[in-house]
Image (cartoon, rainbow, N blue to C red):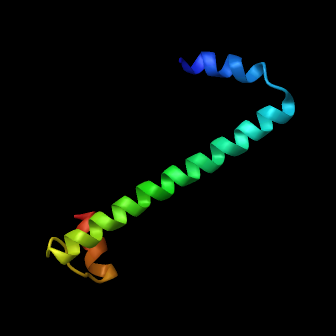
Amino acid sequence: MQFGDVLEAADDLTLDDQEELVAILRRRIVEHRREKLTAEIQTACQEFVEGGCRPVTPDELMAEVLA
């Protein structure tokens, strides 16, 4: 289904149903972002355990970012 088709289908919904659709989509987006963040944190923790990263001070981090 194309994006335009989805928009047209949403236009056929009642206003209440459109509002519910928006609420559902927002919750799903939040959940997807949460899942992505969780995966990134797990990857970072694994890299740390394997010695792939090390703790640094804020000054060291900024020096590395700006280099």
Q: Quadrant of the C terminus?
A: bottom left
Q: Position of residue 42 (x, y in %)?
A: 32, 66
Q: Position of residue 50 (x, y in %)?
A: 14, 74
Q: Is residue 12 above or below residue 45?
A: above
Image quarter for residue 21? top right
Q: Residue furthest right?
A: 15
Q: Is residue 11 above or below residue 34?
A: above
Image quarter for residue 9? top right
Q: Is residue 42 above or below residue 33?
A: below
The residue lying at 34 percent from left, 80 percent from top is 58
| Left or right: 35, with 55 as reference point | right
Q: Residue furthest left?
A: 51
The residue lying at 36 percent from left, 66 percent from top is 41
Along the line of sight, the residue nearer the viewer: 52 or 17: 17
| Left or right: 65, with 34 as reference point | left
Q: Position of residue 27 (x, y in %)?
A: 63, 50
Count of all numbered marks drawn on residues in the image: 0
| Left or right: 60, with 19 as reference point | left
The residue lying at 64 percent from left, 41 percent from top is 25
Along the line of sight, the residue nearer the viewer: 58 or 38: 38
The residue lying at 19 percent from left, 77 percent from top is 49
Image quarter for residue 52? bottom left
